[in-house]
Structures are given as C-alpha cells and as structure tokens.
Amino acid sequence: MKKILSKLVSSVLALSMIPAMPVYAENVNSGKCGDNASWKYDGNGKLTISGSGKMYDAIDSWNSFSNNITEIEVKSGITYIGVHEFDRLENLKIVSLPNTINQIGDCAFSMCINLEEIKLPDSITSIGSYTFEGCNLKEIVLPQKLSSISDGLFSSCFDLSNIIIPDTITEIGHDAFGGCTSLKTIQLPSNLTSIGEFAFDSSGLTQIVLPESLQDIENCAFVECNNIKSITIPKNVRIIGDIEGGKIFSQNTKIDVSHDNSYFVSENGILFDKNRTTLIHYPIDNSVKEYIIPDSVKKIYPCAFLGATNLEKVQIPNKISVINDSTFANCTNLVELDFPESVTEIKTAVFYGCSNLNSIIIRNPQCVISDPYWESTFKDFQGTIYGYPNSIVQKYANDNGIKFKLIDDLNTTTTSTATTSTATSVVTTTQPVTTHPLGDVNGDDIVDGRDATAILTYYAKTSTGYTGTLEDFIKSQPE
C-alpha cells in the first residue's frame, strides 16, 4: 500500500505541474509536440520526434494509432522528453535517443510492456520517477552524468538481468528495482550513500555487497529478497530503517556488521543498535528454540521475528513498552509469550499465524491491544490469554471471544507444582529408621488393640484439621 500511494502521489504531482497546452489543427499523422518540436508517424510503426528544445508534457496526439507504434526515434536537438510522454505504448520495442537529451520526465515510458531496447546517452542528467516501470528491458547502461536513480525507475521490470551503474550515482530511490525478479546480482556504485524504501523489494538478488560509502538504508530496502543469505553492514552506515517502518531485510538474511561501525552490532546474525537497546532483525535460520532477548533491549522493530519457525519461546525483558506490528507473526512453533509489566501496548498482527501458541501472559493490567481488527492479531490463536481481573485485556478477550484466565490461576498451578516437589523431597530425605513389627505404631514391639485405637484416633483428629504425622501424634499421647 505504501508503494502504491507513493507512486500515485508522484504521478499526481507530475501531472499537476503540466502547463495548459495550446490547441493546434494537426494532420492525422503529424503535428507539434513542443514550441519548436514536432512529431510524425510513418504509418508502418515508427514515430519520429524532431526539432529543438523541450517536448510538451503528456502529449496524446498519437493515441489513435498508439497500438501500432513499435519504434520511436528522437532526433538531435530535442532536450527534454515530457511527463507521461510515451507511457502505455504496449507494442513499442525500440527507442533511439540523441545525445542532446538531458532530461526525461516522470513515467515517460511507463508500462511500455514490450520495450526491450533503449540506449541512454551520457548527456542525460535526470530521469524521472517510474520512467521504465513495467518495461521488458533485459539490460541497461545508465548515463555517466546521472547522480541518482529515481523512485520506481525500473520497478516491475521482470526481465531486467543486467544493469551498469556509474560511480556518479549517490542515491537509489524508493522502489527503484522493486520486483526485478531476474536481477540476480548488481554492482553498487562506490559513492552510493543512500538506499531508499523498497529499493530492491522482491527482487531476484542472490547476493549484494554494500559499498563503504553507504550511510542510510531505508525501511524495507531488501524485504522479500529471499535468496540473499547474508548482508554485511559497512562501517559508515548510520541509519537502518526506523522503528515506525517495516522490515528492512528478508527474514532469510543473516546480518553481519563491520567491526568499525559505530552505530550497529550483530550477534549470530541478529542485528542490534550499538548499545543493544534496539533489536532490529532476527534471521529465521537461527536454530535456537528459546531466545532470551538481552536485558538492555528497550525497543523491537516491527516484523523483527517474522517467520522464525524454530522459536518455541521468547523471553522479553522488563524494559520494552511497545510490541510493534507483526513482531512475532508466523512464528508457527511459538508455544508461550510472557509480556512483562513494562509492556503498555501490543500492536497489529503481533501473533498472526502463530498456530501453536497456547498461552499469552499479559502482566500489565493497563496494556492495550491496539489492533481494531482482532482477527489479524489473533488469527489461528486457539490458546488462553492470562491477565488480571478487570484488566483491559480481559475486556478485549471477552469482547472478541478469546479464552481468558486470571494470572492467579497460572501462579496457583506453578505454586502447587513447586510445593509438591518440595514435599516429595522431604519425604525422600529420611532419618535413620528403627525397625518394628508391621502394625506396631506405638513402638512397644507388640501389635494389639492400643495400636488400632491410636490409628483410628489419629484419622479422626486429621478430619478436624490436624496436620501432624502419625508418628508425631503417637509421641504426643500419654504413656
């Protein structure tokens, strides 16, 4: 949803800046497309742009034969290709650009689903957002004067397998390579400083080396890159997503951190901030069944444990106040979660898909479950919530048909087990015993009516509340 909204905003903003176009009387196969630019269609699939300067934004003069256009040639002299200029020409295959072009507007070739060949001249300094979204490009060489890869530039280019990026590039934008499933490897430029949100989301990358120049990795930058087994965070990275965002890496990815990095640290592939106060990422290939979150941790990123199917139990420190969205979602082998008194809020879909979760213990009576759609948080949950009487979570459970029990019930069970264990220990640790005939309870070596009377009297006394042993009772009787 976040990606879709970003794209819509980009398109609306681009269109809102388009000036009112003058109206011209044009021939069927030719006309003006700029103050000093014109177009011509040859009737055999080729559209030619000639003249000088900028093209107008969003020309639609060739819409009547747009399905017939297979080739576009832009002649020398044209400097700018406008916003949405050639988008959705579904049969366009080849584009030729001159070295006078310096700028291409947003979505200029977006959704030209058969476009497979375009050479970008080094004169280009700017390419707008989503310009090649959904194209059939297999390889591309970016211009040497380009300083950034804009938002969504190659989004959903499913066949793109090779791209050469110049070292002039310092930023990779939001969703730039999202969904590029054929892109297995990529060499990032040596001067890159920032990787945007969803930049490589659901791409086919199997490995990636982050350059030493990198400083910022935004939310979801490598999410669903399920074939990347490990990533090393270089020494200059200072930002990795934020606590309000989503998962940054695929749950399959183990994270290592350069020893020279001053902001982050990793332990067994688990990513923390340097002071270990924030847990950012937990890889699902960790074989640990019970994980104890370090006592220093105060915050956990959303989706941090998503899909960690080996986990059966997680111990949460009494410093964490908020359990963020989807923190334990799809941890299918989790059996118990015990939230300490410090937890004041449990957000959306935290337990989603935790099909073996038997008990959730919430020790703060004021803890709020802030998911308006309880199904997303407790989907597949068949267990019991333990809490305090008249607590917020008791009302929540009752309102949503979730089994609820008091924490005292849980404590009673625990105490009972402990008492039984102690009693057994006392019984088995005995003092030296003197042997007497069977039934001789008073120790006079004679089994007679006095022994029977003593036993009957003892059991009568225990029914009135006496808790001593038979031996204690016998000793208390007069000779």
Image (cartoon, rainbow, N blue to C red):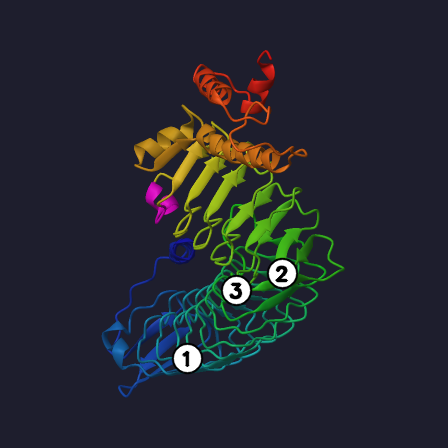
CA gap, disc 2 and disc 1: 56 Å
CA gap, disc 3 and disc 2: 10 Å
The percent position of residue 35, horizontal first and vertical second, equals 41, 68
Do residues under tags 2 and 1 come within 8 Å of each other at their CB atoms?
Answer: no
Judged from the image, the secondary structure of the residue bearing numbered disc 2 is loop
The disc, 2 or 1, on the residue closer to the chain's N-terminal end is 1
Q: What range of the chain is rendered magenta?
A: 373-381
Which circle, 3 or 1, is nearer the viewer?
Answer: 3
Q: Which of 24 and 252 is in front in this view?
A: 252
Judged from the image, the secondary structure of the residue bearing numbered disc 3 is loop
Crowding at label 2, few (<14), some or many (≥20) Cα neighbours within 10 Å? many
Q: Disc 1 marks which residue? A: 50
Is 25 on the left-hand or right-hand side of 244? left
The residue type indicated by label 3 comes to Asn
Q: Disc 3 marks which residue? A: 252
Q: In this view, does 381 lie above or below 343?
A: below
The percent position of residue 386, horizontal first and vertical second, equals 43, 34
The residue type indicated by label 1 comes to Ser
Is residue 172 inside the magenta stretch?
Answer: no
Q: Can residue 20 be seen in this view?
A: yes
The residue type indicated by label 2 comes to Gly
Is residue 378 inside the magenta stretch?
Answer: yes
The tag on residue 269 is 2
